[in-house]
Amino acid sequence: MRLGLDLGGTKIEVVALDASEQERLRRRVATPQGDYAATLQAIIGLIAGAEADLACRATVGLGIPGSLSVQSGKVRNANSTCLNGQPLQADLEQLLGRPVRIENDANCLALSEATDGAAQGAAAAFAVILGTGVGGGLVVNGQLISGRNRIAGEWGHNPLPWPNSAEWDGPPCWCGRRGCLETWLSGPALAASYSPIADAIALEAAAEAGDSLAIEALDLWLDRCARALASIVNVIDPDVIVLGGGLSKIRDLPTRLQTYWKPWIFSDRIETRIVTARYGDSSGVRGAARLWPASPEVV
């Protein structure tokens, strides 16, 4: 049995996959806000409860909104900042008494969707998270590509490509830089472009109702997102791009992005598909479980 966990900013989810890839259990709890020790205990509690219900000892894979430093093994680059600098893997392995595999949550999304999701069968798949944060992951020939520095796919902290004069410098990012894609494309960024008190769902509803300011804000976001994805196509040239996260639910998003990105892709013909994640916001947790093989030799 394999347990996968997705540590998000608002919820922690666990899923159990058996050897035939069937889900045997799924549950969620709220993420303790800004409290590393409480987050550890919430993860441990989910694992203990799942194993008690399944009456077995399982492998554990975890997706996080950051990555582990190659040098120190500690969490870095997490927008859930209480994780940064913490020895999450070592702490969990000590508490559980077994190995734990940890990957970036967008990497887990990519692995899930390339295995049996919207990118199944693709030679190269790039998956993006468009939500509270912005991240990406790459799978080639069924293998997750983490990279030498374990930052492969981290497009969210690259600058917005082909900026116009109004976009130079850009908003400040929590990472200490300015103008990162996350500051332009995240859910909070989209909402703030329309109204300080709105959210992305309210903005889209207003645009659907004909609100000219909402339509303008959404069109500008689509243009920026398309430019950002075009830069991925120009560098990686994947077969498919999978959209995940809350903003992937924007109506007809794949079709609209493919209309906007045509001027920016360095090709006379664009074969790359854009699709939404088959498993929605539960895709990453399935990928976390698959950080272990279906029949591991050691648990």
Image: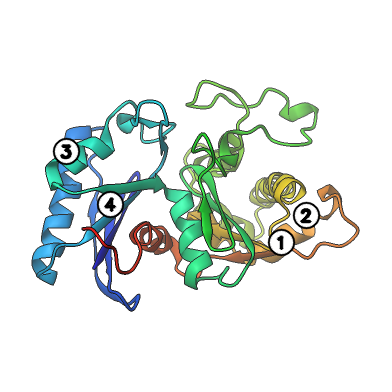
Direction from residue 93 to residue 143 in the image, left or right: right
Which secondary structure, mark 1? helix
Say if mark 1 contacts mark 4, CB within 8 Å.
no
Direction from residue 288 to residue 135 in the image, left or right: right
Neighbour tally class for label 4: few under 14, some 14-19, many 20 plus, Cα within 10 Å: many
Neighbour tally class for label 1: few under 14, some 14-19, many 20 plus, Cα within 10 Å: some
Camera-near label (3 vs 1) is 3
Residue 223 vs 163, above or below: the answer is below
- Sequence-wise, the earlier of marks 4 and 2 is 4
Instruction: Kindly identify which residue carries mark 4.
Output: 12
Camera-near label (1 vs 4) is 4
Q: Residue at x 52, y 45 (%)?
A: 135
Instruction: Kindly identify which residue carries mark 1.
Output: 256
Q: Disc 2 versus disc 1: distance between alpha carbons?
A: 6 Å
- Sequence-wise, the earlier of marks 2 and 3 is 3
Which of 74 and 36 lies nearest the eye of the viewer?
A: 74
Q: Disc 4 versus disc 2: distance between alpha carbons?
A: 35 Å
Q: Disc 1 versus disc 4: distance between alpha carbons?
A: 31 Å
Q: From where the camera sits, is residue 209 visible?
A: no
Instruction: Kindly identify which residue carries mark 3.
Output: 38
Which secondary structure, mark 2? helix
Amino acid type of the residue that numbered disc 2 sits on in the rendered structure? Tyr
Q: Disc 4 versus disc 3: distance between alpha carbons?
A: 12 Å
